[in-house]
Amino acid sequence: PALDLPKIRRNALIEIVPISMGCLNRCTYCKTKHARGDLVSYTPEAVVARVQAVIAQGVREVWLSSEDTGAYGKDIGIGLPTLLDAIVDSLPEGVMLRVGMTNPPHIIEHMEAVARVLNHPRVFSFLHIPVQCASDKVLQDMKREYTRADFELLADYLLEHVPGITIATDIICGFPTETEEDFLETLDLMHKYKFPVVNIAQFYPRPGTVAAKMTKLKSSVVKDRSRKVTTLFESYTTFDNLVGTLQDVWVVEFGKDANYVVGHTSSYVQVLIPREENLLGRRCKVRVDSASKWSVKATLVEVLAEAEALPQVSISRTSVLQSPAQLKASNKPLPGRNLPPSRMTIEEDYGEEDEEDERAGNPAFRRVVLAWAVLVMTV
């Protein structure tokens, strides 16, 4: 679809901009290839034009979305760094960019350039890199096209060259060929990196995939491994080092608790600030008072002025758009329904469009998301 189609945002301050459709991978457990086909990238000019258009509408956070950001442009002879540099050059002060999910194989060749971009003051130092499993044998069976050493090379480079970076990852528990020794390798990787954000999923055999034809592990084994990963993840905290520090925060939403507004640090850590209506859409300096597993709480120090005036949008808690599912349940008409279907898009998913998304909609697939609260906007 064209990038300039009318869109209904659930949050007027955040825009999700797809940079490509489809992927180059052939993971044995995933049906993304079946549903979306091979990689088709938008041109840098089209993406930049969309970014500039939404900034003019008052957007403060731009999220790049793709099944695999690192593979961008391979179908049109352009590398990801070319796109990122063009976007960053178009960002005014006060608008932040979040780079989307990327699998290790394609991003490794760009890791120096990506590290440079993630250090830019208008780019969040955050990257979602799904590892899925730390066993090379299982990764081969999944056809993930990388090894644990490849993942560690990438993670170590980013941690060294992008101070304070937040690395998010995904873990699949109970892939059919995963032995106990394989699983222990995954636990070891989590011990080593203590990822702040982890999506934990139990393997589900998607019909029509190669993995669906494999002999499944006992459900009790899969559940036990999922519990062990969950327990390990919940055993550590990652934001304690922020307590007492001053942080720049970009405020973009109301919190679930009506007493707070929510923003993000440059590393995309969620920050809760005592509610003041005029903070939405503003960049603030705060002092971090306390930290929890999922976020930090902070006290406002000052509202920072931008070098140039940005378009303003008016947002109240009651005017935040409901999701399509909520609208359907309430029997209310979808906003924009008078537009022809071919000329309207709706942001149905308020998170990353990664290769696991389509599986989450299957009720038989028990996806356990433990830390996505750090990333997903709460309404």
Image: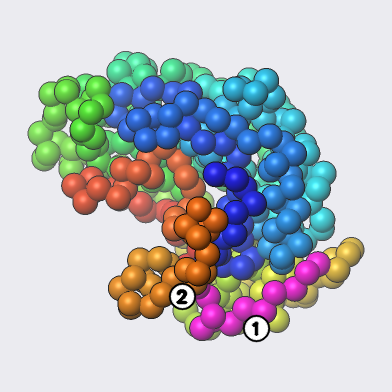
| Residue denoted by label 2 | 256
Q: Which mark is residue 352?
A: none
The x, y position of residue 248, in whole percent, is 72, 62
| Residue denoted by label 1 | 276
Density class for disc 2 (Cα within 10 Å; few <14, some 14-19, many ≥20) is few
The x, y position of residue 299, in whole percent, is 65, 75
Looking at numbered disc 1 in the image, what kind of residue is underneath it?
Glu
Q: Is residue 338 left or right of residue 356?
A: right
Outermost residue toward the right?
A: 307
The x, y position of residue 200, in whole percent, is 33, 44
Q: Quadrant of the N terminus?
A: top right
Q: Provide the secondary structure element on which disc 1 rests.
A: loop
Q: Is residue 206 above or below residue 6?
A: above
Secondary structure mainly formed by the magenta segment? loop
Question: In the image, is residue 259 part of the stretch drawn in magenta?
Answer: no
Q: Based on the displayed image, in which of its 4 quarters is residue 314 positioned?
A: bottom right
The range drawn in magenta is: 310-322
Q: Residue at x 73, y 56 (%)?
A: 53
Q: Would residue 230 be visible to someone looking at this image?
A: no
Looking at numbered disc 2 in the image, what kind of residue is underneath it?
Lys
Q: Is residue 33 left or right of residue 176?
A: right
Residues under labels 2 and 1: Cα distance? 14 Å
Q: Is residue 41 left or right of residue 256?
A: right
Q: Nearer the viewer, residue 248 or 367?
A: 367
Q: Earlier in the sequence, mark 2 or mark 1?
A: 2
The x, y position of residue 100, in whole percent, is 57, 42
Q: Based on the displayed image, in which of its 4 quarters is residue 134 positioned?
A: top left
